[in-house]
Image: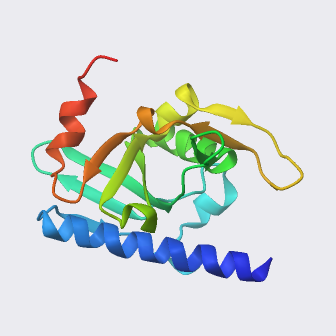
Amino acid sequence: MENIAEENKINGTMAEARFKEWLEKHHIPYMYIQQDLDTFSSVFKEHPFGKRPDFMVLIPHFGLIFVDVKYKKLNKEYKTFTLDSDESKKYSRLQRKFNLQIWYVLSNEDYDYKTWFWIPVSKILEEGIQRHMSNKSKQDFFAVPPTEFVQISIDSSLDRLFSNLFEKK
């Protein structure tokens, strides 16, 4: 169990580093949010919206998007990405309470970190199929097909994210 937790941490750190490289490549301003406990307000520890994303992406003349970068692989059997139910609900509460935009951004080495899957937290709760604990899993999760995400390649810029927001499905 400890090896899996350590591997997940290493994979998550790698995904964050590669995402940071993508932001730098496209000259997208951002702030990395330090995850140490002493940089975390006690208010967030006391209330159920106590979750914080990894990055604040700054968009000139628009505002900002908070981003939680995830190392996620596509479930081969169901062809979905899984996102933790409790975490998504905490982000949703944080988003509503403080009028924030919070997005998940996923990738992994199968895509060589050259494709990033973007989705707002609110869409996870709307479009994701909530699954409950099984013998293998210790937590509830949302299963979301990749078609619900905006896919941005390593060579694309952030404008792809906005152009996809207005496409009809």
Drawn side of residue 156 relative to residue 48, left or right: left
Drawn side of residue 86 relative to residue 125, left or right: right
Query: Residue at the right extreme?
Result: 135
Q: Is residue 161 above or below residue 164?
A: below
Q: Is residue 98 above or below residue 39?
A: above
Identify the residue shown where x is 32% and y is 44%: 151
- In the rendered image, residue 100, in percent from the top left (x then y), is placed at 39, 42
Identify the residue shown where x is 17% and y is 63%: 29
- In the rendered image, residue 48, in percent from the top left (x then y), is placed at 67, 49
Viewer can see residue 121: yes
Res 73 → quadrant: bottom right
Q: Is residue 34 above or below residue 68?
A: below
Foreground: 65 or 112? Answer: 112
Res 137 → quadrant: bottom right
Viewer can see residue 108: no
Drawn side of residue 129 relative to residue 155, left or right: right
